[in-house]
Image (cartoon, rainbow, N blue to C red):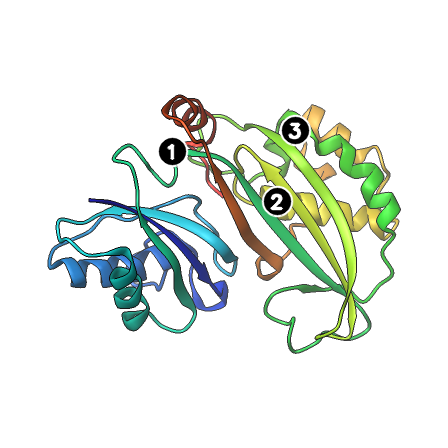
Amino acid sequence: MNYRLTLQYDGTDFHGWQMQEGRRTVQGELTRVLSLLEGEPVIVHGAGRTDAGVHAEAQVASFRLRRQITPERLRGALNGNLDWDVRAIEVEVAPEEFHARFSARSKTYVYRIFNAPFISPFWRRYALHEARPVDLERMRQAARFFLGTHDWTAFSAAQTEARSRVRTVTELEIEERWSMRGRGRLIEIKITANGFLRYMVRSIVGTLLEIGRGEMELETPRRALLTGKRELVGATAPAHGLTLVHVDYAETMAGWASAGAAAGDDDD
């Protein structure tokens, strides 16, 4: 039976999503527990391969089990055997064709920045501390260059498994709010695309921050996209401010097929 799992995790103590010999990863923990429940090895597929330190509010995974078990019992068994920093939120039986990675149409990440002279202990693990003033209007003006379909070579890691570095960004919003819990200004940069390359979101954020601090010209991101020159891009923002918040899936098989072609070779 094919299952779809929605999970959350605090990425601080994980070496990312993907299994690595001798290192604790989210995929590795899920594989360990599911294989224990099944009594034989289970292969787990994730919607995106988040890096070390990156969090997830709604990561999606898929896997097959021979054992007949209801979604409710399976969720309980998973949470009873996983450590506190990863939790199964929802488990459901999925169509046989469903694949967490290849069926995805788009993904949404949010990067959080705590913009105050101090960093609240409640945000220390989940937001970048930026004590300097940041001009959000300048950042929003520059953000328009990132929308649309581009070659993201300048904003991605030099080494990648992706066959193409072309991706389409459909949404990039920069909002601020007062965090009652942290007692400070919280900036949230939300980005949605049909796929992401490794370090892509964090490079975009680093670039926008330099623009917000007045350290980079507004037109520089456009030049970086056109030329592919990494030296035009801001410093890659730290991983702990980044969270995967949503994965969108097509409702039809036709949609799954077209989405897989766009997002199937991601290296988030």
- Residue, disc 1: 102
Which image quarter: residue 227?
A: top right
How much space separates mark 3 and mark 2, taking CA atoms? 16 Å
Name the residue located 85 percent from the left edge and 56 percent from the top edge: 134
Q: Position of residue 20 (x, y in %)?
A: 32, 55
Q: Amino acid at mark 3?
A: Gly
Q: Residues within 10 Å of mark 3 (few under 14, many from 20)?
A: some
Q: Position of residue 10 (x, y in %)?
A: 49, 65
Q: Nearer the viewer, residue 218 or 68?
A: 68
Q: Which residue is mark 2?
A: 201
Query: Which of the two discs, 3 and 2, labels the residue nearer the N terminus?
Result: 2
The answer to which of marks 1 and 3 sits earlier in the sequence is: 1
Work out how far the residue at label 1 is from the one at label 3, CA to CA, in angstroms: 27 Å
- Say whether residue 234 is visible: no
Give coordinates of residue 182: x percent, y percent.
Answer: 72, 74
Camera-near label (2 vs 1) is: 1
> Mark 2 touching mark 1, by CB under 8 A?
no
State which quarter of the image contains the N terminus.
top left
Residue 142: image quadrant is top right
